Image: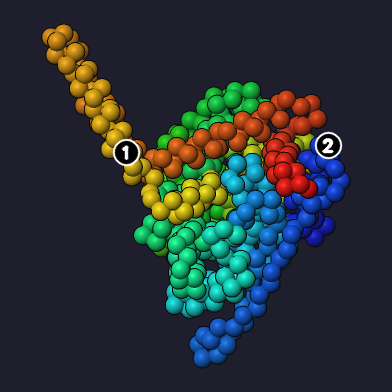
């Protein structure tokens, strides 16, 4: 993939430009607008860990963008590209994202400048625990003040280490498990968290396609069934989004782009087989069941209905925006479209479902996990069997009427099984996520279609989010 051109704004400047475009259409006092826009603070830590017989020094960050609500929330990423500019931009996006989906958090983000592939598991644990120690002792990991989650380069394993480090340092905190989210199930996690961002992408597209007017604005008709989708990045988010959209909604994944090239098949790729190959071989090169293309950029610019950038920021920029052929772009990554590219795509009539909405599935289910940890009980435990018992009463009565009528009609066994089963935690989590994504889209859509001066979903999303943050600050007396 080509890097963003040097004449483009940085990622943080891009976020600010998009914020400014929305704020210009709002009636905010200048002081309040500035308060919402700026990042409250960034903590930089440089710590040493003894590895392979010598001390190695690592640099990490934790940015807090807005404390209009606490705790603040945001992932921790491990990547060689991590710097202060990036974590400030991501923290700002988290503020607007949480406000848009009504998760009661301020925005934060963390990062460690490291390539996790350079270290074995034991070394990564040592590094992670020391990084967590530096943040915990400054309350930058805390159940009521700052709650991290996984991001690029981190996952359940790293979150479990961080949660355990917090518990070791705070032995009397009954809510210790709520200090981070995205943990494994056996360490206080929640069903459906790993798939959450990809599942949220699916629900976002489903909601978009429920509105024929919006689909028509993107130059399409009909449903998701048969739509051609190209996915850039087959990590956790891209994989789950591609899997669900192809297996459950009938979409065709015609292209998959990774760091070593791309695969393209107009009849549709088997996502599971591609993922298995990627895990076994570390890349797409040599995959036998599709056309392999060394130039991933060429596949991203191929003809398709929907393009889902699900990896890094800035992959669609001034160098390639004119060549993108997708009618609809859904930002599954944070900031994959630069501010300049955004202008070009909108002028060409491309509809963009923005990152602050499209990838909010992760923080939404993180919110559910945090609530679960604070309530100390899994979802569904109290009501599931009572729900089943009530349904059994209805079935018993229907079967009594059926018998009285001389078996004039019969209930199918599959209906009985589905109707009788009470919702478990995974079903409740998916229900809550679906409701969140629908409601958030409708709030954006109302602004998009209801105001003559708003022509795109990103500006609409920012307006909704900024107004909610402004109301929180006003309630605090600012």
Front-lying residue, 14 or 73? 73
Residue 39 in percent (x, y) is at 75, 58
Give the number of marks. 2
Residue 9 in percent (x, y) is at 80, 56
Quick one: SS at disc 2?
loop
* Residue at the limit of the structure toward the right, as seen here: 30
Mark 1–mark 2 CB contact (< 8 Å)? no
The residue lying at 45 percent from left, 37 percent from top is: 431
Q: Colour scheme used in the picture?
A: rainbow
Density class for disc 2 (Cα within 10 Å; few <14, some 14-19, many ≥20) is few
- Residue 369 is marked as none
Q: Is residue 320 visible?
A: no
Residue 124 in percent (x, y) is at 49, 74
The residue lying at 55 percent from left, 90 percent from top is: 54
**Mark closer to the chain start, 1 or 2:** 2
Q: CA distance from mark 1 to mark 2?
A: 47 Å
The residue lying at 40 percent from left, 53 percent from top is: 376
- Residue 27 is marked as 2
> Which residue position is annotated with label 1?
384
* Residue at the limit of the structure toward the bottom, as seen here: 53
**Compared to 353, does 61 lie above or below?**
below
**Compared to 435, does 150 lie above or below?**
below
Residue 255 in percent (x, y) is at 53, 46
Quick one: SS at disc 1?
helix
The residue lying at 69 percent from left, 50 percent from top is: 68
Q: Is residue 365 visible?
A: yes
Density class for disc 1 (Cα within 10 Å; few <14, some 14-19, many ≥20) is some
Where the N terminus falls, by quadrant?
bottom right
């Amino acid at each position: 993939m080509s890097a963003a051109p040097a004449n483009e704004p940085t990622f943080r400047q891009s976020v600010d430009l998009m914020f400014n475009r929305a704020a210009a259409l709002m009636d905010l006092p200048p002081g309040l607008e500035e308060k919402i826009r700026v990042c409250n603070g960034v903590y930089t830590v440089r710590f040493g860990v003894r590895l392979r017989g010598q001390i190695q020094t690592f640099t990490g960050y934790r940015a807090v963008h807005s404390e209009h609500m606490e705790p603040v929330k945001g992932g921790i990423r491990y990547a060689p590209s991590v710097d202060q500019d990036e974590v400030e931009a991501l923290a700002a996006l988290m503020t607007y994202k949480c406000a848009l989906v009504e998760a009661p958090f301020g925005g934060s983000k963390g990062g460690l400048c490291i390539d996790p592939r350079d270290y074995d598991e034991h070394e990564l644990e040592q590094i992670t625990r020391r990084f967590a120690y530096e943040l915990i002792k400054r309350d930058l990991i805390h159940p009521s003040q700052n709650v991290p989650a996984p991001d690029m380069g981190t996952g359940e394993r790293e979150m479990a280490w961080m949660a355990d480090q917090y518990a070791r340092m705070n032995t009397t905190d009954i809510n210790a498990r709520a200090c981070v989210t995205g943990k494994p199930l056996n360490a206080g996690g929640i069903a459906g968290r790993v798939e959450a961002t990809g599942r949220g992408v699916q629900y976002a597209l489903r909601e978009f396609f429920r509105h024929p007017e919006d689909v028509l604005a993107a130059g399409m008709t009909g449903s998701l069934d048969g739509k051609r989708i190209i996915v850039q990045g087959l990590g956790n988010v891209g994989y789950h989004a591609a899997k669900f959209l192809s297996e459950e909604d009938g979409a065709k994944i015609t292209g998959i782009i990774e760091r070593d090239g791309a695969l393209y098949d107009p009849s549709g790729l088997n996502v599971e087989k591609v993922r298995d190959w990627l895990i076994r071989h570390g890349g797409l090169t040599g995959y036998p069941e599709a056309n392999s293309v060394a130039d991933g950029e060429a596949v991203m610019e191929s003809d398709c209905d929907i393009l889902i950038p699900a990896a890094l920021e800035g992959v669609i920029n001034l160098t390639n925006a004119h060549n993108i052929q997708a009618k609809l772009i859904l930002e599954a990554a944070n900031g994959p479209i630069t501010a300049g590219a955004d202008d070009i795509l909108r002028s060409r009539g491309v509809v963009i479902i923005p990152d602050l909405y499209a990838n909010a599935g992760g923080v939404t289910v993180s919110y559910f996990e945090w609530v679960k940890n604070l309530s100390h009980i899994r979802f569904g435990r109290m009501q599931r069997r009572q729900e089943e018992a009530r349904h059994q009463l209805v079935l018993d009565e229907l079967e009594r009427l059926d018998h009285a009528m001389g078996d004039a009609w019969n209930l199918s066994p599959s209906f009985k099984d589905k109707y009788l089963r009470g919702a478990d935690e995974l079903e409740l989590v998916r229900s809550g996520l679906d409701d969140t994504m629908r409601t958030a889209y409708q709030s954006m859509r109302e602004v998009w279609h209801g105001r003559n001066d708003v022509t795109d979903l990103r500006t609409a999303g920012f307006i909704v989010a900024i107004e909610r943050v402004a109301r929180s600050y006003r309630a605090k007396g600012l």
